[in-house]
Amino acid sequence: MMPPHRTARLTISLTIVTALAWIVAQLMGANAWVAEQAGFIPLRFAISTDGFIVPDWLTPFTATLVHGDIVHIAFNLVMLVYCGRAVEQVLGALPLALLYIIGAAAAAFAQYLVNPSSSVPMIGASGAISAVLAVYALLFSRNEVRAIGPIPAHWVRALWLAAGWTGVQWLLGFATSRGSYQIATAAHVGGFLVGLAMARPLLAWRYRRA
């Protein structure tokens, strides 16, 4: 059941800014340069690097503004609008902003853990959006879940979602591993897991403030 309609201003703003960033890069013909400068490159955190405009610590967040082709950005923005709008209506703008930022950081950290020596830029908002998607799944899932022994029902639901999402991502990663377009599997999983972990604290914070 969707919450009462309210304008999801943060979701709309994120969507517009992300779309504009991609359009400007495309019009300038500088998508590859932008990806190198603003994308998250794990190797930059392992060795001293020069020639980059964006500081290392900022790249987990600037990477969310960089996308590849039209399919990449279109899919991400559709997911952001669909899930972000609903989540923002429940949590509010500030909790959603924290979720998005921490999801982006967690995605980059997860990608670093699996391949710290990679020199390939990780780009896209998928990791941050995965965090939003996780909260959306917990909030609007209609399947009844029962407790398993001492494990409460809400944790059982979260564990099932985590297992399912992780499985799907690894399958997608395997399917695209030999192609020209590769999925940042660890980033998607990292963002999603953080979203699952943040859902209840954000809800408690939101309604304690209400």
Image (tube, rainbow, N blue to C red):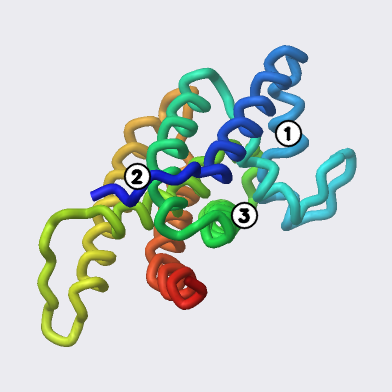
Q: Is residue 39 left or right of residue 10?
A: right
Q: Is residue 121 above or below residue 49?
A: above
Q: Please rate how many residues cluster around mark 1, counting C-alpha atoms within 10 Å: few if below 14, some from 14 to 19, many from 20.
A: many
Whether tag 2 and tag 3 are in contact, CB under 8 A, the answer is no
Q: Is residue 138 left or right of residue 76?
A: left
Q: Is residue 208 above or below residue 75?
A: below
Q: Amino acid at mark 2?
A: Gln
Element on which disc 1 rests: helix
Q: Please rate how many residues cluster around mark 2, counting C-alpha atoms within 10 Å: few if below 14, some from 14 to 19, many from 20.
A: some
- Residue 165 position, x and y percent, is 30, 51
Name the foreground residue: 58 vs 178.
58
Q: Is residue 84 visible?
A: no
Q: Earlier in the sequence, mark 1 or mark 3?
A: 1
- Residue 37 position, x and y percent, is 77, 36
Residue 90, image quadrant: bottom left
The residue identified by callout 3 is 116
- Residue 11 position, x and y percent, is 53, 42
- Residue 154 position, x and y percent, is 24, 71
The residue identified by callout 1 is 36
Alpha carbon separation for disc pair 2 and 3? 20 Å
Residue positioned 43% across, 28% down in the render: 75
Q: Amino acid at mark 3?
A: Pro
The residue identified by callout 2 is 169
Q: Is residue 202 visible?
A: yes
Q: Please rate how many residues cluster around mark 3, counting C-alpha atoms within 10 Å: few if below 14, some from 14 to 19, many from 20.
A: some
